[in-house]
Image (spheres, grey):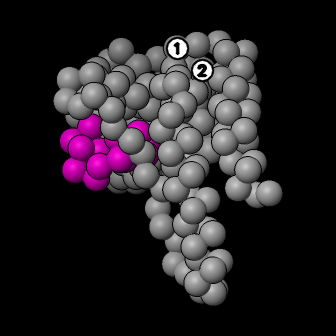
Amino acid sequence: MLFFKNYSSLDDDHLMLLIADEDHRAFRELLERHQGSVHGFAFRFLGDAHEAADVAQETFLRIFTNAATYTPGTSFRAWAMRIARNLCLDYVRKKKPLLVEQLPEQPDHDTPMHAAIRQETADALAQAVRRLPESQRTALILRHNEGLRYDEIAMAMDVTVSAVESLLVRARKALRSVLSPLSA
């Protein structure tokens, strides 16, 4: 095992090669880099912080144990999100009939009326997102909350880029149709 004093200067591909050789310092660096986004995705998908923490922990355990199967040159983030997505889906199937994502509340600095309108809109959006088919909801979360590119989403979801585009168009159209009466 090689010893690098500055793991933070290594890219994800190099870290994964070291992790495949069971380098725990490399794993710690990768965990620190990506733990927030994996946990955030799981939280938005499952709607529960404790369940999201369990899924995030299991995601990184699988990353460590399957590091040798990672293909350098592909998007590590998309690979990690695919693992997290599959674990979330497994969790939903095994534990609960329907889990929902939640939107974080924003602090209010304006009038009670504006706060009520903003809350009503946020509630309507959360409910509309919960009602989207799983594939549309996943694509939407990966794009808008996690900031993944279309090709990374395609890799994470095991679909084509065209399918991602179609999923996002349909999801946005469905959300617009639900939310447009609120803006009238």
Please state if 33 lies on the left or on the right of 144 as rendered.
Answer: left
The residue lying toward the viewer, choosing from 53 and 80, is 53
Quarter containing the C terminus: bottom right
In the shown orientation, is residue 103 left or right of residue 139? Answer: left
Can residue 70 be spotted in the picture?
yes
State the image coordinates of residue 107 (x, y, percent, origin top left).
52, 78
User: Residue 106 placed where, x, y %?
Assistant: 52, 71
Disc 2 and disc 1 in contact, CB within 8 angstroms: yes
Q: Which mark is residue 158?
A: 1
In depth, the one of 55 and 47 nearer the eye is 47
Amino acid type of disc 2? Answer: Ala
Residue positioned 33% across, 37% down in the render: 99
Image quadrant in which you'd find residue 165: top right
Q: Label 2, on which residue?
A: 154
Secondary structure state at the residue bearing disc 2? helix
Separation of marks 2 and 1 at Cα, in angstroms: 6 Å
Position of the N terminus, as image quadrant, is top left
Q: Main secondary structure of the magenta part?
A: helix
Q: How many marks?
A: 2
Point out residue 144 in the picture as x, y percentages from the top left corner. 62, 44
Query: In the structure shown, which secondary structural element does the residue marked by tag 1 occupy?
Result: loop
Q: Residue at x 48, y 38 (%)?
A: 130
Membership of 95 in magenta stretch:
no
Front one among 80 and 177: 177
Q: Which residues are magenta?
A: 41-55
Residue at 52%, 25% in the rendered image: 133
The amino acid type of the residue labelled 1 equals Asp
